[in-house]
Image (tube, rainbow, N blue to C red):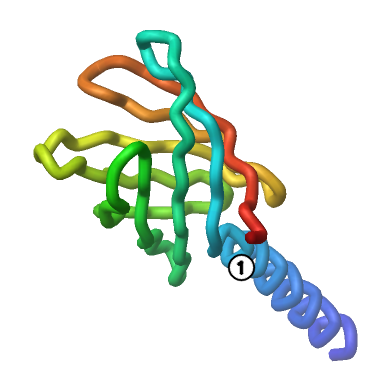
Amino acid sequence: MKRRIFTTMALVCCIMVCFAAIADMTGKWTGMLKTPDGNDLQINFIFTVDGDKLTGTAQGDGDPVPIDSGRISGNEFSFTAANPQGVVFKHSGKFFGDSVSMNIDVNGTKLHATLKRDDK
């Protein structure tokens, strides 16, 4: 009986650690994106994680835009964000605790950025 209780408690603790790691992505993240013309563009994201749902805002050189269709599974995530002209950018990536590796599809052109938590 004690072994069963111990095993159950160990599983509960493991699940809580997994959820804590996912929730840790919540916050402000910044990085630099190399554009196809060779320029560097600062990008900013504010992520909010609620279960497997990812929401927040994305910002490049204009005003922040909402994150749509955001999903997170383990340390992998995906979402879309549209600029004011209606162009939809597909984002996907992985969360590593202290950084986020993100791929962005811009009209078929694949771009990559690494984000760091912005504690400001």
- Judging depth in this view, the residue of 13 and 60 nearest the camera is 60
Placement of 16 over or under 101, stated as above or below: below
Dot 1, crowdedness within 10 Å: few (<14), some or many (≥20)? some
For mark 1, give the secondary structure: helix
- Residue at left offset 10%, top offset 38%: 85
Residue drawn at x 35%, y 56% is 57
Amino acid type, residue under disc 1 in the picture:
Phe
The quarter of the image holding the C terminus is bottom right
The foreground one among 96 and 89 is 89
Picture quadrant of residue 72: bottom left
Q: Position of residue 62 (x, y in %)?
A: 29, 43
Task: Give the residue at the far top of this rendering.
Answer: 37
The spot of residue 36 in percent (x, y) is: 36, 11
The residue at the far bottom in this view is 1
Q: Is residue 22 left or right of residue 65?
A: right
Q: Could you tell me which quadrant the N terminus lies in?
A: bottom right
Q: Is residue 51 above or below residue 70?
A: below
The image shows residue 113 at horizontal and vertical percentages of: 52, 29
The residue that disc 1 covers is 19
Question: Residue reaching furthest left?
Answer: 85
Does 37 appear above or below 13?
A: above
Instruction: State whether residue 23 is above or below residue 74.
Output: below
Residue 46 appears left or right of 98? left
Residue at position x 27%, y 56% in the image: 66
Furthest toward the right, the residue is 2
For image coordinates 45% across by 69% down, the residue present is 51
Residue 19 position, x and y percent, is 61, 68
Front-lying residue, 22 or 65: 65
Q: Is residue 2 left or right of residue 101?
A: right
Horizontal side of 79 relative to 107 (left or right) equals: right
